[in-house]
Structure formats: C-alpha cells, structure tokens
Image (tube, rainbow, N blue to C red):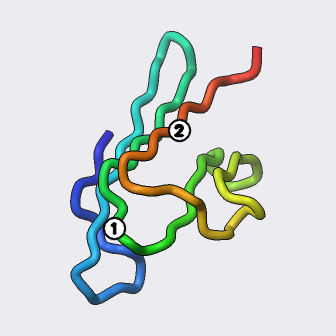
Amino acid sequence: VEWPGVRYFNDSGGARVTFEIVLEETTGVINLLYPTLGSRQATAGVENFDGSDGVSLCSPPGAPCPLTSGSRVRLTPRP
C-alpha cells in the first residue's frame, strides 16, 4: 500500500512525503519504505487496531525518528 505525496499533519505548506507498507502474507514480515520524506521530522511504527500494543521506530516512542529519504525498515514476527 502506497501513500504518495501526503502532507504532514497540520501543515498548510507544500511539504509532501511518500511512504509505503509492503505486507508479506506468507511470512508475516512488514516492510516500511520511505522513498521521500523531505526535511521535516516524523514518527513511525506499527500498532494493533486499538493502539494497546505496538512497535515504535523512535526512542522514546513518540519522539522524532532518525529516518531519511530512502529509509527502509523490516519488521519480522517473533517465532
């Protein structure tokens, strides 16, 4: 699933980002792709449907992540 040219939340300027999630159904692996992020900071991660469990790519959770354009993150399930 790709989100091309998305504006940052609460930003009326022209900053746009593109990101993509690739789900591997047979392995449960989640690939997060960030082809264009611009110069703004962002938070990133995944969580369940009600937000009670998740994984943040940032430390501490909710803090800006050190992601840059071209970043790729691979999340693999525990055996």
Which quarter of the figure has residue 9? bottom left
Q: Residue at x 41, y 39 (%)?
A: 21
Judge from the rendering whether residue 67 lies leftward or rightward of residue 18; answer left or right: right
Which quarter of the figure has residue 51? bottom right
Q: Residue at x 70, y 46 (%)?
A: 55
- Residue at the far bottom in the pictured view: 12
Q: Give amino acid for label 1.
A: Gly
Q: CA distance from mark 1 to mark 2?
A: 17 Å
Q: Residue at x 43, y 74 (%)?
A: 40
User: Label 2: few (<14), some or many (≥20) within 10 Å?
Assistant: some
Mark 1 / mark 2, whichever is N-terminal: 1
Q: Give amino acid for label 2.
A: Val
Residue 52, position as x, y percentages in the image: 76, 53
Q: Considering only vertical position in the picture, is 49 above or below 79?
A: below
Judge from the rendering whether residue 9 lies leftward or rightward of residue 35; answer left or right: right
Residue 15, position as x, y percentages in the image: 28, 76
Please give the residue where the numbered disc 1 appears in the rendered image: 38
Q: Considering only vertical position in the picture, is 78 above or below 73?
A: above
Element assignment for label 2: strand
Please give the residue where the numbered disc 2 appears in the rendered image: 73
Element assignment for label 1: loop
Residue 31, position as x, y percentages in the image: 47, 33
Residue 5, position as x, y percentages in the image: 22, 62
User: Label 1: few (<14), some or many (≥20) within 10 Å?
Assistant: few
